[in-house]
Amino acid sequence: MEQALFSVVTDRHNGIPSTNGPRLGTLKHSNSQVDTPAFMFYTKCGSVPYISREVFEKILPDDQALFNFPLPTCLSFYQPLKEFNHGLNAFVGLEKYLSCCSITDCAVDNLQGYNKKDSVAVKTKSGNQLINYEKYMDIIEVFKPTMYVTLSISDINLDSSPSAIEKSVNITNRLFKSCLEQHHQSEILKQSCVIAPIQGGYNVQERIRSATFLSEYQNDVLGFLFDGFFTDGSIVEEIPSDLILPIVNKTMECLPYDKMKIIFGAWTPSLIIDFINSGVDIFDSSFPYITTERNSALIFDYSLKFKNEIIIMDIHHNKDEKTDSSNDYEICLTDTSNFEKFVPIKDSCTCLTCKKHTRSYIHHLLISNELLGSMLLTIHNLHYFNTFFKDIREVLKKK
Amino acid sequence: MEKPLQFDVIASCSTTRARTRNTYHLGLRPGVELLKKAKGLHNFMGWKRALLTDSGGFQMVSLLHMAEINEQGVNFESPYDGTKSLLTPEKSIQIQNAIGADIIMQLDDVVPTTSKDNERMEEATYRTTRWLDRCLSAHERPNEQNIFPIVQGGLIEHLRKLSANLHLERKVNGYAIGGLSGGEAKEDFWKMVFLSTQMLPGDKPKYVMGVGFAVDLVICCALGADMFDCVFPTRTARFGCALTSSGQISLRHKKFRMDFGPIEKNCSCSTCKTYTRAYIHQIVTSEAVSCNLLSVHNLNYQMQLMKGIRESIKVNKFPEFVQQFMINMYPNKNYPQWCIDALQSLNKTLELKNLLRHKLKPIHFILESTMMYKQFWYPLLFMVMVLKNEIKV
Ligand SMILES: [Zn+2]
Ligand SMILES: [Zn+2]
């Protein structure tokens, strides 16, 4: 089997490559193809939360998908996988799909400050484990993902000190080189691709330093990850766009045009559009996951258009839907206003949940603490998020 | 089978002990009003097939320590806000009429199975029949819904007979055998089941409430029972247990860490087709999805078991089926004594063939709600639902 391949299909700059700007791309691996902009499915312990493979195939019947496996949630698979010997995808029942291994669980509050020198602290069910690059590459050889992020120090957030940021860039760069060396020596990893993690917190100079260093190895990597913006995945929606966007834009300019650009985290749909306009290709499904976790359903009405070389999203506010516990994008199904609403979550939605069930029923399930409630919400939210990305790709296709 | 009963698929509703708080939280909301507006439970859940609801009496008594029973009904105090409520037979039927299930249960006077208070047991036996009459006269939809009386009498032989005899005088389409599976000895359990099934008419379905283990189910079928509920496969799934033809296994056990086979070889369920024991072992205590994976398998197991029973009866091979089942379950032939006793008593008292000839197809139905999505993946499978949340008293 060959390695995965990413290519930019079209951008809006009439053939003049520019890294800043929305673009369509494809990620290909043997018979699989994922069109970008896209998102990776967030997993916990190898599964999309609440969703078995059987149900997942009902959400995305024909589509290819890319799954993100955060290391803290699947580190305990190492021993059995070593004996199993067919890799992570097969073990978790998701063979035929593409996979990415990453270092941090971007939907939860992560450890901070437990890293020791060049070893990264990974919080697992059975306590913290320090992982050095040799151990990490051993894990990756056993997991055999389609792609993986190299080991990195990314416990940086808005409050991190300049010295912590500088350190994270230094160590991450060092770890990248070490991992890459191991990668090239490994027979097993000939089929896996490397993702380079850019650090630097909210410091433009450090970001540029990181991106410039990693770009020297552009021929060795499939893409770049914009990493180290937060430690607590549950508050990502609150990060102001004017703090992060200039950083992403500046960093993007230092990166090779034709490589895949990734950012993880529960960014709002509006910021996702901004990131796509900056040239980001791949996200993850932390946002619908976190929405489900607060018993909410995505319902935002939007229209997308392409104007002045960027995507513009208008969100239509629906006065009827406004409740205390909802934001612009969602409604809370545990809110008592849904008690007697015998209507689907979203009339126009074609997901299995909306075709079959009412808000009243889902409200009842959630209040009763039935897992089925979260499952129905996940089905809707993932479907909605997936449709959102399809619509984005459609807008980019229309010349 | 008389009309309105249709036995192709039956689902049922019950509560789960683990969720008392939420149950009562909702219980105090206008659940019945909501269901009326939703045009019944079938519509509320998007379920087109048959449903069965329980009366709520058992749940009140087993979940609420402060429940108190008198001739009027079950008095209880809500642990949620302390309000006092009374569940009468009339109220129970009114609620179940609003819910609209195809089979509904009478409100019965519940005494713990292992109670030694014979006087109380006798009182409960008579009261259960008095309440049955009140339920029958309160019934507003007799052409759409079937009330099942519940045969009570604890473990006392003459009370069981009495209860069954009293119920026999009423015009109903099927019977439930209650007051068992409450921690009594298996010796007592099977005798009471047998006693009840022998008393009840052969051409009407007999539902043994609360039966779980596969062995119990097979023996009860042999003893003449027709219907069972399915609390067990989904509840046991929640504790990380899987049902297999050689018994129950707990996937939490570390011996499964390196076991890369399916839960059961040759199992046709989607879990066994996709996942290994080793993977389920990894997620069994932490991830909600493990509940689904195990429920899918366990329900499939129980349904295949029932199907096996049905098919063996059709071709007159039920005794052979029981034999093979027991050997699979107990490869060392260390059969539980009560099974041997139960099966031997069949040979003595009745020709097994005669007993089975009148038997209806055994029907398996399912309680609880974790697997409800099954309804739109596989419309032919049974489904599950919690009722008590809808009850407002
Ligand atoms: Zn939907
Ligand atoms: Zn199975």
Image: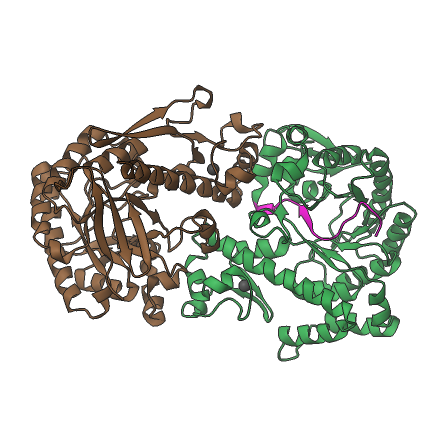
Question: Looking at the picture, how far across and down is residue B314, in whole percent?
Answer: 77, 67
Most extreme residue toward the right is B169
- Give the vertical position of B221 relative to A196 (above or below): below
Residue at the spot x=12%, y=45% of the render?
A255
Along the horizontal axis of the image, is A374 left or right of B230? Answer: left
Q: Quadrant of residue B47?
A: top right
Residue at the spot x=90%, y=45% of the render?
B170
Nearest the eye: A62 or A16: A16
Q: Color used for chain A?
A: brown
Question: Looking at the picture, how far across and down is residue A322, in whole percent?
Answer: 43, 22
Is residue B252 in view?
no
- Residue B206 located within the stretch drawn in magenta: no
- Give the vertical position of B29 relative to B382 (above or below): above
Q: Which residues are magenta?
A: B1-18
Nearest the eye: A127 or A73: A73
Residue at the spot x=38%, y=63% of the render?
A91
Question: Looking at the picture, how far across and down is residue A373, in whole percent?
Answer: 51, 41
Secondary structure character of the magenta stretch overall: loop
Chain ID for green: B
Indicate the quadrant containing the C terminus of chain B: top left, top right, bottom left or bottom right: top right
Query: Is the image coloured rainbow, by chain, by secondary structure, or in one colour?
Result: by chain
Question: Looking at the picture, how far across and down is residue A173, in whole percent?
Answer: 11, 52
Is residue B77 in view?
yes
Along the horizontal axis of the image, is A319 left or right of B159? Answer: left
